[in-house]
Image: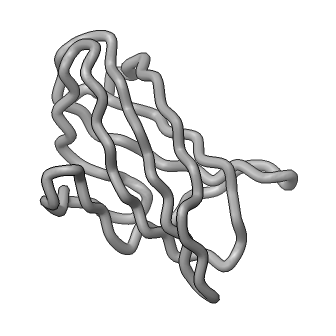
Amino acid sequence: VLVALEIWHLGFLVKRTKDTLEYVVILKGGITEKCHLKLIAVGEEGSEKLKIKKVVNSAGDNPHFSGNTIHSIYLEEDKEIKLNVLIESPIKYSLKIDAYAL
């Protein structure tokens, strides 16, 4: 059973190529918790799943991911986490991020 967590997040585009978009994502949780993050593309036509190609955290590590989900991210209360996320898409989207406790 997945339990949704309330997190603050900000995502902004930093690099665009023909077939990929690179976003910086900043997260801040209200509690200390290990979670999965689901990234969803939000556009004028609605929302859809994204295909993540690469994730790098601020320590230079590569958290495990599959499809549109980044797995086992450890949030600490009132501390920010920064991730660089490369997405396969030629179209720029706004990001919606849902967090689920493990």
In which quadrant of the rendered view does residue 33 lie?
top left
* Depicted 24 relative to depicted 80: above or below: below
x then y, percent, for residue 5: 37, 19
Q: Quadrant of the N terminus?
A: top left
Residue 79 located left or right of residue 17? left
Residue 14 located left or right of residue 74? right
Q: Residue at x 52, y 76 (%)?
A: 88
Tally of numbered tags: 0
* Depicted 102 relative to depicted 3: above or below: below
76 and 69: which one is in front? 76
x then y, percent, for residue 84: 37, 58
Q: Residue at x 67, y 49 (%)?
A: 94
Q: Residue at x 49, y 39 (%)?
A: 97
Residue 1 located left or right of residue 43? left
x then y, percent, for residue 39: 48, 49
37 and 25: which one is in front? 25
Q: Quadrant of the C terminus?
A: top left
Residue 18 located left or right of residue 7? right
In which quadrant of the rendered view does residue 14 lie?
bottom right
